[in-house]
C-alpha cells in the first residue's frame, strides 16, 4: 500500500504536482492518466524514492520514503518509461547485478522463469547495447519484478512490447494480488487491467474513481478522460 498526502513538486517555476493526495491500496491496480507533462512520471519517480519533492508525505506500507527509505523501498518495484541500463553488460549480467543489490539468493531461477515468460531468454547472453527497444523494456521489467515486490510502479509498461508480450504483461498485472500503479496514455490498458483511475491535468487531480463507473457513465475510458479534462 502506498499513501500520498499533500504532495507538491516544482521544477523552477513549473509546478509538476500541486498538493495532491492518492491512496494506492493493496490488491488494487490503479491507473494514472494525463497528457504529457501532467505529472504522471514525476509521481512514480517520487514514490520510488528517485527524486525529491517540495512538501507532503509518501508512506510505503507505513514507512516514509524519506525517513525510512531503505525499508520503504525494500518492497518496491519500479519500471521507468525509459529503461536505465548498462549497455556493455549482457542481459544476464545486468539482472544478476540488480539481484545482488537487492540481496536475492539464487536469482537464476526467477530470471530464467521471467525471461522465458517474456520471450527473451535466448538473448540473455547478448550485450544489452544490441537489444531493440522492446527487449530493453523486457529486461527492465524483469529487474523491476524479480524480487516479487508488494508495490509495483509501472510507467508506460507496454511501451515497445510486441502484442504477445503485451498480452502476457496484462495478464500478469491482472493476476497480481498486491499494489500496482500504472502511468499510461492508453485508455485500452486502463480498461483491461485497472480497478481505479486518476485523471491528472497540469499537476492536479481533476477526477478519480472506479474504472467500471467511468465506463458505465461515459461508454469508455477515452470518453471519460476527455469529458473530465474539459
Image (cartoon, rainbow, N blue to C red):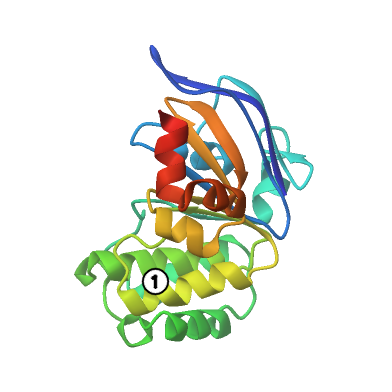
Does residue 52 lie above or below 48 as drawn? above
- Mark 1 burial class by Cα count in 10 Å: few <14, some 14-19, many 20+: some
Return the x and y of residue 140 as percentages of the image width and height: 41, 63
Picture coordinates of residue 54, whole percent (x, y): 56, 19
Closer to the camera in the image, 67 or 7: 7
Label 1 sits on residue: 166
Quarter of the rendering containing residue 21: top right
Is any atom of residue 151 visible in this view?
yes
Who's the residue at 41% across and 59% down the image?
188
Residue 84 position within the rendered picture, expressed as x and y whole percent measured from the top left? 36, 53
Residue drawn at x 33%, y 36% is 36
- Side (left or right) of 57 relative to 125: right
SS of the residue under disc 1: helix
Quick check: 93 left or right of 103? left
**Quadrant assignment for the C terminus:** top left
User: What count of labels does the image hold?
Assistant: 1
Q: In percent of the image, x 30 and y 82: which residue is there?
A: 123
Q: Is residue 97 visible?
A: no
Q: Position of residue 47 (x, y in %)?
A: 58, 41
Image side of residue 5 versus residue 87, left or right:
right
Residue in the image at 56% along x and 80% along y? 110
Quarter assignment of residue 53 = top right
Instruction: State the residue lying farthest toward the top.
Output: 13
Out of 166 and 227, give the one closest to the viewer: 227
Amino acid at each position: 500500500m502506498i499513501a500520498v498526502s499533500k504532495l507538491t513538486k516544482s521544477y523552477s517555476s513549473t509546478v509538476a504536482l500541486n498538493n495532491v493526495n492518492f491512496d494506492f491500496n493493496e490488491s488494487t491496480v490503479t491507473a494514472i492518466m494525463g497528457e504529457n507533462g501532467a505529472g504522471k512520471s514525476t509521481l512514480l519517480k517520487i514514490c520510488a524514492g528517485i527524486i525529491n519533492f517540495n512538501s507532503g508525505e509518501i508512506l510505503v506500507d507505513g514507512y516514509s520514503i524519506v525517513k525510512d527509505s531503505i525499508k520503504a523501498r525494500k518492497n518496491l518495484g519500479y519500471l521507468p518509461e525509459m529503461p536505465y541500463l548498462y549497455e556493455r553488460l549482457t542481459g544476464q549480467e545486468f539482472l544478476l547485478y540488480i539481484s545482488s543489490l537487492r540481496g536475492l539468493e539464487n536469482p537464476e531461477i526467477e530470471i530464467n522463469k521471467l525471461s522465458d515468460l517474456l520471450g527473451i531468454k535466448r538473448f540473455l547472453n547478448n550485450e544489452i547495447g544490441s537489444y531493440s527497444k522492446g527487449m530493453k523494456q523486457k529486461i527492465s521489467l524483469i529487474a523491476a519484478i524479480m524480487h516479487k515486490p508488494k508495490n509495483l510502479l509501472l510507467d508506460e509498461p507496454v511501451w515497445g512490447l510486441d502484442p504477445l508480450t503485451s498480452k502476457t504483461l496484462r495478464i500478469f498485472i491482472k493476476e497480481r494480488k498486491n499494489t500496482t500503479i500504472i502511468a499510461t496514455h492508453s485508455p485500452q490498458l486502463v480498461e483491461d487491467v485497472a480497478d481505479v483511475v486518476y485523471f491528472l491535468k497540469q499537476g492536479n487531480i481533476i477526477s478519480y474513481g472506479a474504472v467500471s463507473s467511468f465506463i458505465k457513465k461515459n461508454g469508455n475510458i477515452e470518453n471519460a478522460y476527455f469529458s473530465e479534462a474539459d
